[in-house]
Image: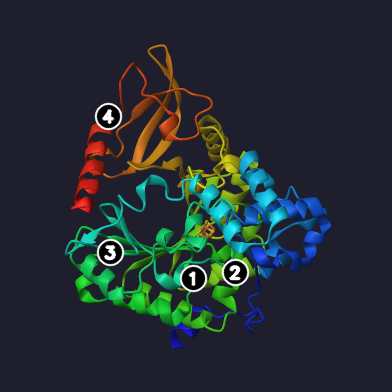
């Protein structure tokens, strides 16, 4: 506690008695009083979709973030509650027919799994291309795609305080163990990191690692301050708890010890970065959310923010302007605008790449230099993170100007490349190289990386 007193992390104005965490899943949809504002048909539609895509929402989100006078249009409502259009008409009708005709769990689950398979549960080769090997064995719960950064999925952190309807990791939440990344062993992670001195950043992710009790998180974090891991300079923690459960940093029974732990790590000289997911400025508007930010910053943590551009939620430059301005005011660093990924309920959320670029451009022009730290719009694809830099006309051809921000081969980074302009395209795979080229410059090499990986796995 001495550390806490010294830097004023302690909350002064808040009731710091732990608040009960109350959560609703697909089976408890009928217990959410506010949903009586919807018609019975709308509630049934919600159930149909919730049988396919994961659904989970907590009381704080229901009571504080959703404007119930504005449903079904409210952006946070759409961020957490399933909507009919998230499934194709055909899939929706089939699932609805099953639910109307039977309560046989086996039949319902079979149909759900059939539909899920069509929704590209693991985009960008996550389950194959990114898993590293140690002593010829794959290391479960770890992904190593870019040279400097390793992703770690602690097994106790593979759930979230609420689920986002757009989530690109939705497959982890549907109970299929084959589709989950998670690892219990801090030792395996430490061994792998110790053997790779070129890794500078560890991203602890999920789900949401902040669902973990401080004691569990401490097992992983404290192992990172051992001398053999001096090369790990930055510990990033991907989380949406600042939005969905800010109590985690203010009033949970172990929130003080969590902040004490984070402060201890920052005092060793490592950079601790909270990679905060915010999709709308409303998520930062509650006094509790702002107090959580204040306490994290007092612990020496830097909060960086990211979000995909989502139709129905933030497909509007005004929303981004207000969000980035507010983030800068609260001391957060805007980091990424992503393009909605090619998985799950993408059909509902995606916008054409050209629209994403227009929203980004219109928003970035209206914020000060301190908010222009945000990069994007970026696609997290198999070869790397591809940013849309703009639309231009070169030698009479209208093109997208693209670049890698991160890539499987670091040599690809920052090399501009060009695609034929396509007003409908929503992902890299839809784009064709410009100027009559047969393929993009990285294609042969990327194909070879994929071939090598698959060959080594079949050995
Ligand atoms: S908090 Fe992150 S991992 Fe959890 S559902 Fe939302 S996007 Fe997915």
Q: Nearer the viewer, residue 236 or 99?
A: 99
The residue at 31%/20% (across/down) is 437
Element marked by disc 3: loop
Q: Pointer 4: what residue?
A: 441
Q: Which mark is residue 294?
A: none
Q: Answer yes or no: do the residues labelled 1 and 4 have beta carbons within 8 Å?
A: no
The Cα atoms of the two marked residues, 3 and 4, are separated by 31 Å
Is 201 on the left or on the right of 105, as rendered?
left
Q: Answer yes or no: do the residues labelled 4 and 2 have beta carbons within 8 Å?
A: no
Please rate how many residues cluster around mark 3, counting C-alpha atoms within 10 Å: few if below 14, some from 14 to 19, many from 20. some
Q: Earlier in the sequence, mark 1 or mark 4?
A: 1
- Asked if 11 appears above or below 345 in the picture, the reply is below
Q: Earlier in the sequence, mark 3 or mark 4?
A: 3
The residue at 39%/69% (across/down) is 154
Nearer mark to the viewer, of 3 and 1: 3
The Cα atoms of the two marked residues, 1 and 2, are separated by 9 Å
**Residue sitting farthest toward the bottom:** 2
Element marked by disc 4: loop
Nearer mark to the viewer, of 2 and 3: 3
Element marked by disc 2: loop
Q: Pointer 2: what residue?
A: 245
Q: Pointer 1: what residue?
A: 210
Q: Answer yes or no: do the residues labelled 1 and 2 have beta carbons within 8 Å?
A: yes
Nearer mark to the viewer, of 3 and 4: 3
Q: Position of residue 30 (x, y in %)?
A: 75, 65
Q: Pointer 3: what residue?
A: 139
The residue at 62%/57% (across/down) is 51
């Amino acid at each position: 506690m001495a550390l806490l007193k010294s830097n004023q992390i302690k909350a002064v104005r808040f009731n710091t008695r732990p608040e009960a965490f109350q959560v609703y899943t697909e089976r408890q949809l009928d217990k959410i009083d506010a949903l009586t504002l919807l018609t019975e048909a709308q509630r049934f539609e919600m159930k149909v979709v919730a049988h396919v895509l994961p659904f989970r929402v907590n009381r704080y989100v229901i009571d504080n973030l959703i404007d119930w006078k504005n449903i079904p249009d409210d952006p946070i409502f759409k961020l957490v509650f399933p909507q009919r259009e998230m499934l194709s008409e055909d899939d929706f009708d089939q699932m609805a027919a099953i639910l109307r005709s039977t309560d046989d769990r086996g039949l319902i689950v079979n149909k759900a799994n059939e539909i899920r398979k069509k929704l590209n549960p693991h985009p960008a080769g996550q389950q194959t291309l990114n898993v590293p090997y140690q002593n010829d064995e794959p290391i479960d719960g770890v992904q190593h795609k870019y040279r400097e950064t390793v992703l770690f999925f602690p097994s106790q952190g593979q759930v979230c305080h609420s689920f986002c309807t757009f989530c690109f990791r939705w497959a982890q939440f549907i109970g299929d163990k084959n589709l989950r990344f998670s690892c219990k062993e801090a030792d395996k992670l430490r061994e792998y990191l110790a053997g790779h001195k070129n890794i500078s950043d560890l991203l602890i992710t999920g789900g949401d690692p902040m669902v973990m009790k401080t004691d569990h998180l401490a097992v992983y974090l404290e192992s990172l301050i051992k001398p053999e891991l001096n090369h790990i300079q930055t510990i990033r923690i991907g989380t949406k708890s600042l939005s969905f459960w800010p109590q985690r940093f203010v009033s949970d029974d172990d929130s003080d010890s969590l902040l004490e732990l984070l402060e201890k790590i920052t005092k060793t000289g490592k950079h601790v970065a909270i990679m905060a997911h915010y999709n709308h400025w409303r998520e930062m508007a509650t006094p509790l959310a702002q107090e959580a930010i204040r306490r994290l910053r007092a612990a020496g943590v830097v909060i960086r923010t990211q979000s995909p551009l989502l139709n129905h939620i933030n497909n509007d430059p005004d929303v981004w302007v207000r969000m980035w301005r507010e983030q800068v005011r609260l001391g957060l660093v805007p980091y990424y605008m992503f393009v909605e990924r090619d998985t799950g309920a993408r059909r509902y959320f995606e916008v054409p790449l050209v629209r994403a670029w227009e929203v980004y451009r219109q928003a970035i022009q209206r914020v000060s230099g301190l908010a222009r730290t945000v990069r994007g719009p970026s696609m997290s694809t198999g070869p790397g993170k591809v940013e849309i830099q703009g639309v231009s006309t070169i030698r009479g051809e209208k093109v997208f100007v693209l670049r890698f921000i991160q890539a499987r081969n670091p040599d690809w980074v920052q090399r501009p490349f060009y695609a034929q302009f396509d007003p409908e395209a929503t992902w890299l795979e839809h784009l064709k190289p410009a100027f009559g080229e047969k393929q993009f410059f990285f294609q042969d090499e990327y194909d070879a990386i994929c071939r090598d990986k698959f060959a080594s796995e079949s050995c």
